[in-house]
Image (tube, rainbow, N blue to C red):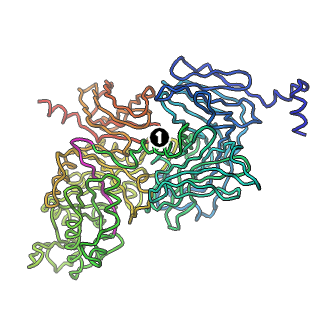
Amino acid sequence: MKQFLWTVLSTGSLAPFALANIFSIDTSGVRPGPIAVVSDARSATVRWKDANSRQWSAEFSLDSEKPLITGIGVNGKKVIDRASPVYRCSTGKRRGGFDAFFDFPPSAPQGTRSFLGEFHATGARAVSIGDRMELSFDGMKLGIFAGTIRYVFYPGSRLIKQEAVLKTEEPDTAYFYDAGLKMTADQDRSVGGNMASHISYFDANGQFQTVTPPYGSEWHPLAVRYRAVDAKIGAGNVAVFPAPHQYFFARDYTTNMGYAWESSWRGSVSLGIRQLPDDNSPYYPWMNAPPGTEQHMGMFLLVDDRDARSALEDVLRYTHGDRFPQLAGYKKFSPHWHLAYTVQAMDHGYDWPPPFKSVMKRIGLDAAMIMEFHGDGHPADTSGVRLKEIEALYAACRAQSDPAFLLIPAEEANVYLGGHWSVAFPKPVFWYMSRKDSEPFSAKDAKYGTVYRTGNADELWDMVKRENGYVYQTHPRTKGSTGYPDKIRETAYFRDPRYWGTGWKAMPSDLSSPRLGERAFKTLDDMNNWGVKKRMLGEVDVFQIQESDELYAHMNVNYVKLPELPAFDNYGRLLDAVARGDYFISTGEILLPSVSVLGDQGKIVVDTKTQYTYPLEMAEVVWGDGSQTSRKLIPLTDTHEFGEKSFHWDVEAKDWKWARVAIWDVAGNGAFTNPVWREDVRENAK
């Protein structure tokens, strides 16, 4: 019947039936600029130029019965033909609050639900956002979620963002989503109902692969490096990939479980990104969707009229090939790794090459701080075994340190001080985590020198101060630090400068936020409003790693201002630089070679030099007056990809006591400083 109606419509009869499928687009928000939108009764077309001044166009259908994307091409050559967005999701219930990590939605009594996306466009809008163009199409439903499909175009770029911007009103919602694009590929049809499509990617070990999918309609999962998959399509190629960090919720492990998918079936090729419902561990918390929040379920496209390898290598540029780049005058430092290295080195010998070292060097680290005896070793031992393991820890770290790589020994000790916390000393310190009343706090040992036995928080902190150690609260307000550091805010040891502050990690995941790690930022701001000068330290908090892991997605790094990497015997110099606050934190795509925060009682003056890969989204200047946190959001929607720019901002901020700066891009990647205190600015100016 539908075919008959379309045949009749083509002759001009029954026109009212045709209009039922047509929706309009509102272009009143479009301003003159580098990206234009033209529309008629049946379509809307976006036109823009790439970095090489080549003319691109993306045509969208205003007929809800047709594929949303009529075509995307360059200089008259069509690459993508008749394409539609693809979404599916699973939802469950969050238990323990939205900051909880120790959660697993499939184990909840309510179980979980899975949904396929339904899209029936009812209206559209085109809006200029700075130099960019955003097209939104109403009529997207994904189970308990509803909202719009959006496409964002960037001048001077072949990068396109596709996102479903959806809300739910259900309480305590945890979810994850898969996304993709289904494209017509009639040219790939071959005899017998087969498809001769070409799918390309770098496999989990970094080798370039091109395959022809087997016969079948399934979504074929792919374990790829760099999170990207490409299809030869039309007059070129298209690669799809997620935001490199934002799409990945926190896990204890970084195993590459296959986060890309492809399908080639009956005249169409589909590519996309995906998550999995579990990793066979007890804690796998999914993403958060607080009621009424707009969840931005995104995916990126990079369209190219060249070959697949060229397209994929251009994707790699956005993350520097999953490598934290060098920055003159800085060293890249990453703490909180549970690698069980010491016990393995004791078994295999100190000349055994641990699998993590090559991975860390490939990803660009200069220094890593491992936290041993966390589920391995004998941290609670009091018979001498622990002392042998501490001796081995320092010997093993020395063995793996070289002029270009520093391995720093530490422990996540978690006794007496409250919650989980890490301690690092600038030299070997031998100590037990308990003490009987009849045993001394410290005693001389013929082999190990001074040996401490700690029986409470005061004794432990006495040891930390005597041995020039440093402590910070790992994963504050979640995991084993739930309720901390709030519960110890008035203690003398927390207020001591040797207690650095807290860790920062992108945990939990909430795609309604333009930034990562809201929990950790809120903790940082609260601590400084308590009147204590505390900082965040970027941390990773994962267990053993191997070459094929999806590690970069779960990482951040501290860029520490140091003229050179210290030798192992002097690694305390790096710890001292962290204690001074001489560093910024980055997910890798944005760098801050210099940041200055000055001002008087009523104004904050910020100057920064910034390097970035993705187009930037916003900057924020955040400050506190001792009781309240405030922020100024500064749109950066006129920036283009792969830029380097200096910014100057004057921000009115009455009675500010401390201030910090953060910059975020369109993929949720960021770089940010720790708080600067106004009284220190005045003192330094004298």
Quarter location, residue 657: top left
Q: Is residue 334 magenta?
A: yes
Q: Is residue 295 left or right of residue 516?
A: right
Q: Main secondary structure of the magenta part?
A: strand
x, y percentage for residue 301? 55, 40
* Above or below for 553 versus 163: below
Q: Is residue 659 left or right of residue 39?
A: left
Which quadrant: the C terminus?
top left
The tally of labels here is 1
* Above or below for 322 versus 18: below
* Above or below for 459 versus 238: below
Q: Is residue 446 magenta?
A: no
Q: Is residue 606 left or right of residue 684?
A: right
Quarter location, residue 37: top right
Residue 531 can be seen, yes or no: yes
Observer-nearest of 629 and 622: 622
Mark 1 lies on residue: 667
Residue at the bottom extreme of this rendering: 383
Residue type, numbered disc 1 = Ala
Q: Residue drawn 44% across and 41% down? A: 515
x, y percentage for residue 54? 52, 27
Which quadrant: the N terminus?
top right
x, y percentage for residue 234? 64, 39
x, y percentage for residue 141? 68, 43
Observer-nearest of 93 and 424: 424
Please report the bounds of the magenta region as a residue range. Answer: 327-339
Label 1's element?
A: loop
- Disc 1 crowd rating (10 Å Cα; few below 14, some 14-19, many 20+) is many
Quarter location, residue 586: top left
